[in-house]
Image (cartoon, rainbow, N blue to C red):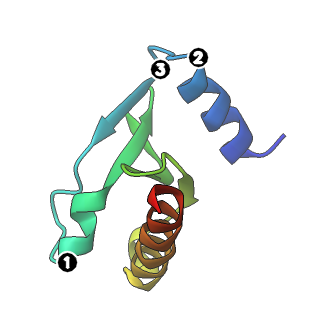
Amino acid sequence: MSDKVVIAKLIAANSDHITYEQYKEASSSVWSDYVKVNVDGSFCQHIKCLHCAMLLKWKQCDGTSGLINHSKSCAKNKALIVS
C-alpha cells in the first residue's frame, strides 16, 4: 500500500495522527489553496488542496508548478460542476 493511500485513509478516518499546517516559507500565493499534511507531527511529503481535498505528493525541491497546474484544473472542474 502506498503512503498516499495510507495517509488518505487516516484523513478519511479523522485520525488524531493527522494534522495540517500552512507552509510558512511560502513565497507564492498559490499556497493559500494548500496545507501541508503531517503524520504524528512530521511532514509526510504530501499536501492537501483546500478546494477539492486531493492529496498531492510534494517536497520543497519540487517548487510550485505542479500546485499551479492543479489549481487551474481544480478551478475548471469546480466551474463545470457549478454550471
Name the secondary structure under disc 3.
loop
Nearer mark to the viewer, of 3 and 2: 2
Label of residue 13 in the image? 2
Q: Give the mark nearest the N terminus, 2 or 1.
A: 2
Quadrant hosting residue 63: bottom left
Label of residue 17 in the image? 3
Seen in the picture, residue 73 relative to 20 is either above or below; the reply is below
The residue closer to the viewer here, 83 or 35, is: 83
Quadrant hosting residue 65: bottom left
Crowd tier of the residue under label 2, counting other residues whose Cα lies within 10 Å: few below 14, some 14–19, many 20 or above: few
Label of residue 28 in the image? 1
**Residue at position x 51%, y 53% from top?**
46
Name the secondary structure under disc 2.
loop
Q: Give the mark nearest the N terminus, 3 or 1.
A: 3
Q: Residue furthest right?
A: 1
Q: Quadrant of the N terminus?
A: top right
**Which residue type does callout 2 highlight?**
Ala
